[in-house]
Image (cartoon, helix red, strand yellow):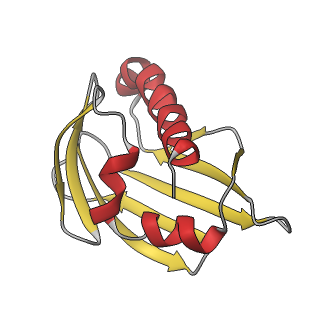
Amino acid sequence: MTRFESQVKTIPHPAARIYGMLSDFDNFSAMLPGDKIKNWESFGDSCRFEVDKVGPVGLKIVDKEDNKTIKYTADGKVPFNFFLWIQLKEMEDGKSKMKITLDAELNPMMKMVAKGPLEKFVGVLADGVAGYNY
């Protein structure tokens, strides 16, 4: 597995509000950059879309811990298997800390091609989640 991690972001909202949005894909697309994501489809606990320079991606929620963690994995036809999770930690002042981690099963050739776009995707996703007005 190749791991990609976002920077820890501070979000000026309680973890419960963020978790509520991120645990239902019907809410998720508003947080993603429209210029990088195309053909978005949501089915509540799963979704499909295309990432610019990466290709088609399907996600499904495989595990949740209320207000703390949401774990996603590949769903359907994808170019490689991966696991993505969002970790939340509420701070005392009603703010939350958030980190996104992506573990991808990449062969050496795919790693050379996809490493840059996947690093960028994780960063863009973290920025989108952190900058969203919950």
Image height check: is 35 above or below 106? above
> How many numbered markers are drawn?
0
Q: Quadrant of residue 106?
A: top left
Q: Which residue extends farthest front?
A: 133
Q: Position of residue 71 (x, y in %)?
A: 48, 66
Q: Position of residue 133 (x, y in %)?
A: 51, 51
Q: Which residue extends farthest bottom?
A: 66
Report whether 74 appears left or right of 68.
left
Q: Position of residue 95 (x, y in %)?
A: 74, 60
Identify which residue, 124 or 17, lies in the foreground.
Answer: 17
Image height check: is 36 above or below 83? above
Q: Quadrant of residue 89?
A: bottom right
Query: Can I make out residue 2 in this image?
Result: no
Image height check: is 27 above or below 30? below
Q: Position of residue 13 (x, y in %)?
A: 65, 61
Residue at the spot 50% in from the left edge and 77% down from the top edge: 64
Q: Which residue extends farthest right?
A: 92
Residue at the spot 41% in from the left edge and 62% down from the top edge: 72
Residue at the spot 42% in from the left edge and 70% down from the top edge: 23
Residue at the spot 51% in from the left edge and 29% down from the top edge: 119
Identify which residue, 72 or 49, lies in the foreground.
Answer: 49
Query: Can I make out residue 51 in this image?
Result: yes
Report whether 70 appears left or right of 109.
right
